[in-house]
């Protein structure tokens, strides 16, 4: 009988420690993406990349990965899981593997095996989306004041890196996402 009470007491203490302890974590994945975003260029280009990553939903996926997986692992193990090159993220649409190889990102849906790739081509200063054997330019840096961005219908347009230019582009794509435009 004492053994049973001891087991219940130990389980209760463990449950309380898990629910009452703070495992906020460092949000390393989201912080890394945001730090990179802040170094892209001017404040208008940074805003444009931020908005594109919000539409794609890069920030949503990284935040969810941090909240549900990475911060908990960091809290309980005492080590940052971002030291590995493959990240696994569980979403409402299934489990995704994200591989960063230094030049881009490969994102693969585990159940279906379907994947897409985001690459930065240094020579042309272009971020591309590679999907089903097709490559789509998402954003090309033209100069320090403008970029060529993909529009919802697949066409491209030049976006001035001013508050007005970025706002006009955001308004144009607000109701659609890049993923819908390419049926990802």
Image (spheres, rainbow, N blue to C red):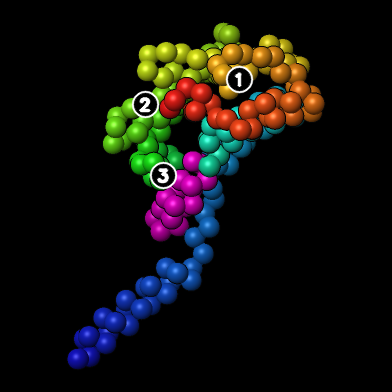
- Local packing at callout 1 (Cα closer than 10 Å; few below 14, some 14-19, many 20+) is some
Using residue 131 as the reference point, say whether residue 165 is left or right of it.
Answer: right
**In this view of the protein, which residue sits in the foreground, 106 or 176?**
176
Q: Residue at x 49, y 68 (%)?
A: 21
Which numbered disc, 2 or 1, marks the residue that appears first in the sequence? 2
**In this view of the protein, which residue sits in the foreground, 156 or 83?**
156
The answer for how far apart the CA atoms under marks 3 and 1 are is: 26 Å
Using residue 118 as the reference point, say whether residue 7 is left or right of it.
Answer: left
Q: Which element is circle 1 on?
A: loop
Write down the residue under mark 3: 91
Examine the rendering and report whether any part of residue 131 can be seen.
yes
* Tag in front: 3 or 1: 1
Q: Is residue 8 above or below residue 118?
A: below
**Where is residue 128 shown, x and y percent of the image?**
51, 17
Write down the residue under mark 1: 151
Residue 147 falls inside the magenta stretch = no
Q: Is residue 131 above or below residue 37?
A: above
**In this view of the protein, which residue sits in the foreground, 167 or 45?**
167
| The residue stretch that appears in magenta | 61-78
Q: Residue at x 71, y 18 (%)?
A: 159
Using residue 98 as the reference point, say whether residue 121 is left or right of it.
Answer: right
Q: Residue at x 32, y 76 (%)?
A: 11
**Where is residue 131 shown, x and y percent of the image?**
41, 19
Name which quarter of the figure residue 90 lies in.
Answer: top left
Q: Main secondary structure of the magenta part?
A: helix
Q: Residue at x 44, y 52 (%)?
A: 68
């Amino acid at each position: 009988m004492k053994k049973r009470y001891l087991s219940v007491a130990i389980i209760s203490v463990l449950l309380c420690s898990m629910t009452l302890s703070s495992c906020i974590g460092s949000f390393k994945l989201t912080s890394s993406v945001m730090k990179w975003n802040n170094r892209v260029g001017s404040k208008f280009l940074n805003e444009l990349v931020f908005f594109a990553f919000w539409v794609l939903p890069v920030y949503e996926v990284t935040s969810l990965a941090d909240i549900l997986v990475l911060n908990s692992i960091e809290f309980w193990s005492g080590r940052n899981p971002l030291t590995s090159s493959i990240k696994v993220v569980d979403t409402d649409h299934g489990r995704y593997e994200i591989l960063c190889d230094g030049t881009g990102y490969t994102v693969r849906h585990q159940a279906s095996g379907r994947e897409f790739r985001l690459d930065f081509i240094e020579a042309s200063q272009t971020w591309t989306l590679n999907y089903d054997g097709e490559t789509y330019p998402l954003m090309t840096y033209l100069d320090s004041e403008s970029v060529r961005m993909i529009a919802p219908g697949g066409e491209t347009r030049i976006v001035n890196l001013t508050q007005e230019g970025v706002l006009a582009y955001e308004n144009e794509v607000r109701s659609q996402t890049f993923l819908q435009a390419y049926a990802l």
